Amino acid sequence: MSKYSHQVSGANFSFDGLVDLMAKATPLRSGDELAGCAAQSDAERAAAQWALSDVSLDVFLEDLLVPYESDEVTRLIIDSHDRAAFGAISHLTVGGLRDWLLDAAASRDSASTLRSVAAGLTPEMVAAVSKIMRNQDLISVARAAEVTSAFRTTVGLPGTLSTRLQPNHPTDDPRGIAAATLDGLLLGSGDAVIGINPATDSPHATSDLLYLLDEIRQRFEIPTQSCVLSHVTTTMELIGKGVPVDLVFQSVAGTEGANSGFGVDVSVLREANEAGRSLHRGTVGNNVMYLETGQGSALSAGAHLGTGGRPVDQQTLEARAYAVCRDLEPLLVNTVVGFIGPEYLYDGKQIVRAGLEDHFCGKLLGLPMGVDVCYTNHAEADQDDMDTLLTLLGTAGVAFVIAVPGADDVMLGYQSLSFHDVLYVRQVLGLKPAPEFAAWLDRLGMVDGSGRILDVDALGSPLRSLTSAR
């Protein structure tokens, strides 16, 4: 007889171990259907959620979803687990943790309470509790959690929303990249990072782009950081050659096999972190890693199987990626929530839910969590769905979002947010850029007394040289 079962509407549902229970309890998404682990009906999903809510948290330290012996991410999770921090919640079930989190979020000292248990939570615990939470629960708890990081700007402060300015170009044309960069800066974007996805991963091309961004930053004395999103080994090579590297980028996932597909392991990532920090280029902090994740990455790499060879649901594997991120104390982490495609998140409803889950899980685990609010052109989603997710994430206290010219990334071929979308959400929710960047905008006369971005024609003389470059 199965260890886990529950009855719904007179029908009894049994689940083949914790891996199966976690998958069946997950809100519907196409990736789990593709993997063959999704619940077959709403009734089965409800039964799984009821059964999961009764699971004790300490079970996740013994009944491992991905084997310890064969997966270094599991070893990292278990070996780094803080038993002292776990003590405050060790007596709880998954359902009890939900109640505890909501109570903590409503308390006067919510931020410190949530911070005190972060190291005692494993990704599997956090993924489990997210599966039994409504969207408003995910928003309430994530908003209460406060996580900051710093390099030349401070990211994640309450009342702020930072942005990655993403000036991609299909041929890495410096003029096109510079024009997109200036466009974003004039609209108040770029305080989290000015980050380029290069069309080629060659060291020469990456070096050229890094020098271009560093020249722009220094010329206009912009308090921000730059990054070219080449492979981590390419960036380390350039650090050794004295190229101006601010942040070290890498995509990461929640299993050893998926990370191997990215060409990395934990030791390489730690080496890269030390290499970036050794440059001491930050002014207000020395968090140097920029990490990207996304639901479905392990499944797309065929590296999603757990204990007993059973598929682990994609949301739990995404949360496990945050253990890798947490180990590196990054400046920025973001889930590229709708980028992989409808095979993993089919429509706007699934993308919105996944974005809230990822943000909640990452922030609860202690990460400065951002989201690329995005979708591919063949997904059943549109910009209205992105407006909804952006507004919900802004309410939930997301650290940063990604913005591209016109919301259309012409190099990667997907839809994200525009610079104007960022202005919208900052205005309606009363959010500001990172304080160092906000002071720069004010110093150059780019904002009015309330912090709103001025029209280009109203800009003061300090920006004449900048606007003439357009």
Image: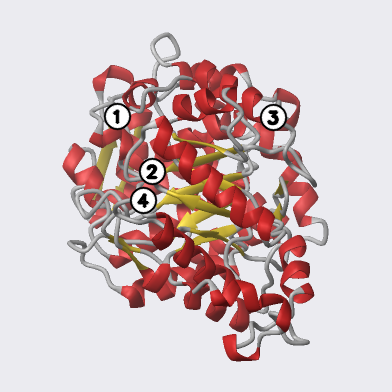
Q: Position of residue 183 (x, y in %)?
A: 50, 72
Identified by mark 3, the residue type is: Arg
Mark 4 Cα-neighbour bin, 10 Å: few <14, some 14–19, many ≥20: many
**Disc 3 versus disc 2: nearer the observer:** 3
**Disc 4 versus disc 1: nearer the observer:** 4
User: Is any part of residue 54 visible from this angle?
Assistant: no
* Number of the label disc, if any, that sits on residue 277: 3
Q: Are marks 3 and 2 in contact (CB under 8 Å)?
A: no
Q: CA distance from mark 4 to mark 1?
A: 34 Å
Q: Position of residue 216 (x, y in %)?
A: 60, 57
Q: Which sits earlier in the primary sequence, circle 4 or circle 2?
A: 4
Q: Position of residue 166 (x, y in %)?
A: 46, 58
Along the viewing direction, whichever of 15 and 118 lies nearer the viewer: 118
Q: Which sits earlier in the primary sequence, circle 3 or circle 1?
A: 3
Q: Which residue is mark 2?
A: 315
Q: Which residue is mark 4?
A: 172
Identified by mark 2, the residue type is: Gln
